[in-house]
Image (cartoon, coloured by chain):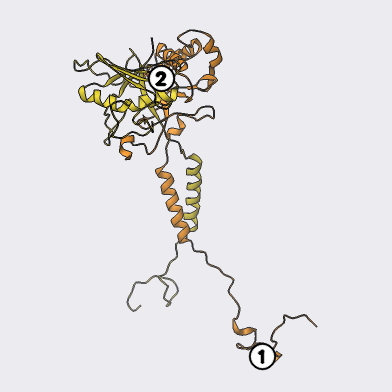
Chain colours: A orange, B yellow
Amino acid sequence: MAIVTPGKRYGARLQKSKIFGKGAHGKKGTFADLLITPLVDMFVIIVIFLLQNFSASGDILFLSKDISLPDATNGKDIERAPVVQITSEAVILEGEPVAQIFDLNRDEYWNIPALEEKLRDLKKRYEVIHSSDPSGGFKGDINIQGHKEVQFKTIKRVMYSCNQAGYANINFAVMQAGSGKPAEEKK
Amino acid sequence: MAGGMDLGGKKGGKKSLDTAINLVPFIDLMAVTISFLIMTAVWNQISRLQVSQSGGPSENTAPPDTKTLPLNLLVTERGFSISAGGSAIEIPKANGSYVYCHASGPDKIDDKCDDLTLVGALKKIKGDVPDQRNITVQCEDGVKYDDLVKVIDVCNLKDSTQNPILFPDVSVSAVG
């Protein structure tokens, strides 16, 4: 004899009874309908939020773990230009190290010869590429992406080298602090 | 047919007007778009502060104005020193940090900066010489880049309409 669950057991005659037997609930449907409306709402909100925050300026400068940018509230939008990165250990032009800070601290020059030479090459290349384009004249823009703890004695040598190579419009890359509005507006 | 438009379908039968929009392709599209936007999202907004080396060309080259004066801001490891024309203002560090607006909080800038702070002193000079746009920031070798950027940021201070209220044409030079 089969083992059955303890409890009331009716006879075979009442097994199909709606009151006493198992026929009270009938067969439950196996089809469960998912509510898609909240899911679609959530997707729409996420897409709108992401589109509003979409920015292409991240493609111009790449944040390195060696460089922590200083914060500023009154900056302008960044533009594409050659990038000089200054870490605590090296000066890097367009991803290629050109000088070590340790070596720079030993000599007393105002410029960084290797950086200046490479910048002159970049300028020449730009002028050759844009020689047939009258509107694409050389503006001398350059972005300096420096670590916040770097001392001014390194910055000034980089700036001097840029200036000597013809890059006079120097832009310091900074992290936009707060909402991007001036600090006076916050209160 | 008795009234209503013939919607076709089975001969003689009424077709239900309830239609279900197939949301599956829409959800697929949303999922792909969200994945793409999250992968390409840039959460850090990077901007730039334009400077020129002292004596070098600047983007906003205005004709020389007689209503301006030579304005120098010296940044040393001891504090700020502003020389405007013949007068000089010393703003020493307070509690080891530069005094931008308040001695208690160097990063808080509002309208209540007194004259012995960097913002207050620069606003006072700007009030005396409203046409002045140029300032030369001189730095000692030991000053950190972070402090230099904060000083340039203060010089580029803007009002609620994004118009500069201090000296937006900043030249940077070394001491000596």
Identified at 24% across, 25% down, the residue is: B124
Corner quadrant of residue B113: top left
Q: What is the CA distance from the residue labelled 1 to the residue labelled 2? A: 99 Å
User: What percent of the width, then of the height, locates residue B55?
Assistant: 33, 12
The residue sitting at the front extreme is B95
Pick whichever, A12 or B90, lies toward us: B90
Residue A138 seen by the camera: no
User: What percent of the width, then of the height, locates residue A144?
Assistant: 44, 22
> Which SS class for mark 2?
loop
Identified at 42% across, 47% down, the residue is: A49
User: What percent of the width, then of the height, locates residue A109?
Assistant: 47, 7
User: Which residue type carries mark 2?
Assistant: Arg
Bin the neighbour count of mark 1 within 10 Å (Cα to Cα): few under 14, some 14-19, many 20 and up. Answer: some
Chain under numbered label 1: A
Q: Which mark is residue B78?
A: 2
Foreground tag (1 vs 2): 2
Mark 1 highlights which residue?
Answer: A14
A52 up-or-down from B133: above or below? below
The residue sitting at the left extreme is B66
Residue B47 seen by the camera: yes
The residue sitting at the top extreme is A108
